[in-house]
Amino acid sequence: MIRTRFSPSPTGMLHLGNVRAALFSVLYAKKMNGQFILRIEDTDVVRSDEKFSDILQTDLQWLGIHWQEGPGVGGPHAPYFQSQRHEIYAKYYDKLEQLGLAYPCFCSDHELALNRKLQLSRGQPPRYPGTCFKLTKEDVAAKIAEGKKPALRFHVPLKKSIDFVDAVKGAQHFNSDDIGDFIIRRAEGTASFMFCNAIDDSLMGVTQVLRGEDHLANTPRQLMILESLNLHTPKYGHLSLITSDDGAKLSKRGESFSLHDLHNEGYLPKAILNYLSRLSHTYEQNKLMSFEELANDFHLEKLSRSSARFDRNQLLHWQKEAVMAMDIKDVWPWLGDEIKNKVPADLQDAFIDVVRPNICFPSEASEWVTILFSPKLDLDEEKINLLKTADEAFFKTLLEAVAQHGTDIKTILNDVKQKLNVSGKNLFMPVRIALTGQQHGPELPQIVNLLGKDRMQKRFEQALEIVRAN
């Protein structure tokens, strides 16, 4: 059975690069009738925060990403928080030490920095030179007696070729001599990402890992760990990075790209799913697709090796598509009670029909509530100047027509056209500005249906007062 996973660290909000890795993992599992696992990698005690763990789970579920194993669900490989799995890791640390493949390292950060600087000055790749590998048991015991706390390093064998086929990037080759011994347990006793990530993938039966290409260099290290312990190794696929407009990699510091922020801005899950699914993955259908459709048409071989640029305009395109596709019963929960309560009950369905083509977010719907149901428009200088393209006679004629024809805007406009010999933009723009204060928006018949006769009259009277005063 295909088993995929997403293993975020709770050190901040989920950025879209991480969300896409989760999405591709769950789409692939869904397509292959497999299982998707959520695992929280919270071994970094300094930076990890339980609140971020709660938020990321809530955000993933809101987006429609659900896991068959993990926090809140359980499963045969619990616990799914790495901070609760230290005893499991300890067993494998002991085994590696017994095999002579791991050893304590007492080198300080300062010593390591000096060594890296020296290697770089000699034109050598910076890697650990194996200083503490030479320590005897007596040396180690003496340093521990002095109160020094060692990290634990994995001993990389010399002249070993590490080869694997990446699901995205194809055949990969690494030479162990270019890697150097690396830390698998920190000095304070917590497991490093390199170690616990690999161990848990194996023990949880993960068959396919999909993650960012910034992890590609970690893969040979993790393969060596698993091979040394005679543990199952998953297949790997490294996704091209998503970059911002300036070409920089998206990160947790990029709050504008946070899933949590997009949720709060009013983006719909279906819009985000359709946008992210197409970042470095090709779909033949360029239409709004359901989660099931996205999964059915997901193929590892269609993943691109080229980086993808975050394009907010494209995200807005899918947001617009998602808004238009919403069932009307789902629109009000999205807009919120504050907006709903400002719209007369008998006009609520009509309000949605009118404004939906003109909005992408609840905040824009709120603006239209103000425009359509406020007793008086607040017009800026630009809008006042547009009103002044008409004169007093124009708005007096409009008021006479409203008194005679009510909300029959077509007849009203025809009256003004015939009596004043005005047409086109000179006819429609002053009317639109007077009624809505906007140059664009819903069709005028829809507008007047919501305004009603009395509010129409007040809007035209306000416009007449402005023209007279200027």
Image (spheres, rainbow, N blue to C red):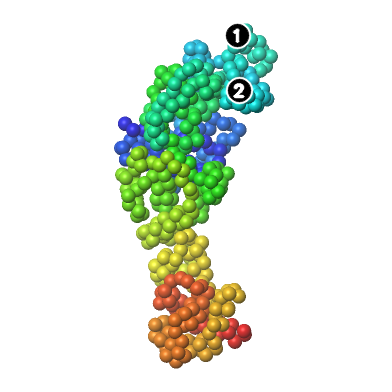
Q: Amino acid at mark 1?
A: Thr
Q: At x 54% / y 27%, what residue is drawn? A: 192
Which secondary structure, mark 1?
loop
Q: Are marks 1 and 2 in contact (CB under 8 Å)?
A: no
x, y percent for residue 210: 42, 36
Q: Answer with mark 1 or mark 2, whichever residue precedes in sequence.
A: 1
Residue with the most extreme front position:
123
Which secondary structure, mark 2?
loop
Alpha carbon distance from label 1 to label 2: 19 Å
- State which quadrant residue 118 falls in: top right
| Residue corresponding to mark 2 | 187
Residue 346 seen from this side: yes
Q: Amino acid at mark 2?
A: Ala
Mark 1 or mark 2, whichever is nearer to me: 1
Above or below: residue 131 compared with residue 417: above
Q: At x 48% / y 60%, what residue is drawn? A: 362
Q: At x 69% / y 14%, what residue is drawn? A: 146
In terms of depth relative to the viewer, which is nearer, 248 or 200?
Answer: 248
x, y percent for residue 370: 52, 70
317 on left or right of 104: left
| Residue corresponding to mark 1 | 136
Q: At x 55% / y 88%, what residue is drawn? A: 392
